[in-house]
Amino acid sequence: MLQPERATRQSWTSLKPLPAQRSQLSLERAFTEQEYERICLGFIPERMEDKWFMFVEDDTLYIHRSWTGNCIYQLTLSKEGTDYPVREAFVNRDQSQYSGSDDHYDEKMLMFLIDHLLLNKRYPMPMPGNVLAGIPTELHYSHVLGAGQRAESGPIHLTIRGTLAWLWRWLTWLIKR
C-alpha cells in the first residue's frame, strides 16, 4: 500500500544521525525516474510492528530503525540523464546501535529494503551468513521487517509439528551463540 504523504525528517521523532563508525558499501545500481519518485515518498511506519522509517532529503535516502531512531543505512543518488545511480552508500557500524558487520550482507539488505518497502518488489529476503539454514524464516522476517511485512510471496503453511521443529532448531541455535 502506498502512503498518501511524503515522509520527511519531521515525520518521525527521535532520529539519530549516522554515526562516525560506519562502513562504505559498494553498490552498482541505478533507479529509473519512476523508481526515484517512489523512493522520495519514503516509508512511514503505520503500526508498532513496522521496523523502518525512511525519508529522502537532498537526494540522500536515510533509513532508520523506527523504534530506536538509529540511522542504519544512508544512500545518496545522483541524476544522470533519466537514471539515478547510487553515488555512495553507508551502513552503521556502531555496535551499540547495530550489530551487523558484514558489508556484503548489508549491501543486499539495503537493496532489499528499498525494493521491498519502497518499490513493492517481492523476492526472498537475504539472510545473514551467521544464521543457520531453516531457522530464520518468519521469526527473522519479523525481526527485520516487522510482523505485517512479508519477505516473499506465497502462503505460509504452518503445522504444529513443523512449528515445534523450527522452534527447537531456533532454541538450539540461540543456545550455541
Image (cartoon, rainbow, N blue to C red):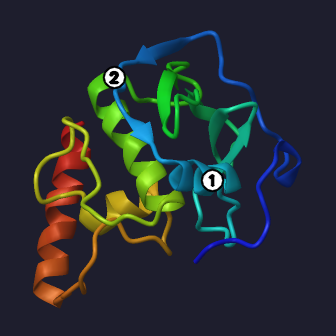
- Name which residue lies at 26% across and 62% down: 123
Q: Is residue 150 left or right of residue 11?
A: left
- Name which residue lies at 69% across and 71% down: 3
Q: Position of residue 148 (x, y in %)?
A: 50, 75
Q: Does 76 appear above or below 137?
A: above
Q: Does 72 appear above or below 155?
A: above
Name the mark on residue 37: 1
Tell me which amino acid carries mark 1.
Glu
Label 2 neighbour load within 10 Å: few <14, some 14-19, many 20+: some
Where residue 68 sits, quadrant-wise, is top right
Q: Is residue 22 visible?
A: yes
Is the N terminus in the top left, top right, bottom left or bottom right quadrant? bottom right
**Circle 1 sits in a helix, a strand or a loop, which is it?**
helix
Q: Nearer the viewer, residue 49 or 88?
A: 88
Q: Is residue 114 left or right of residue 134?
A: right
Where residue 137 sits, quadrant-wise, is bottom left
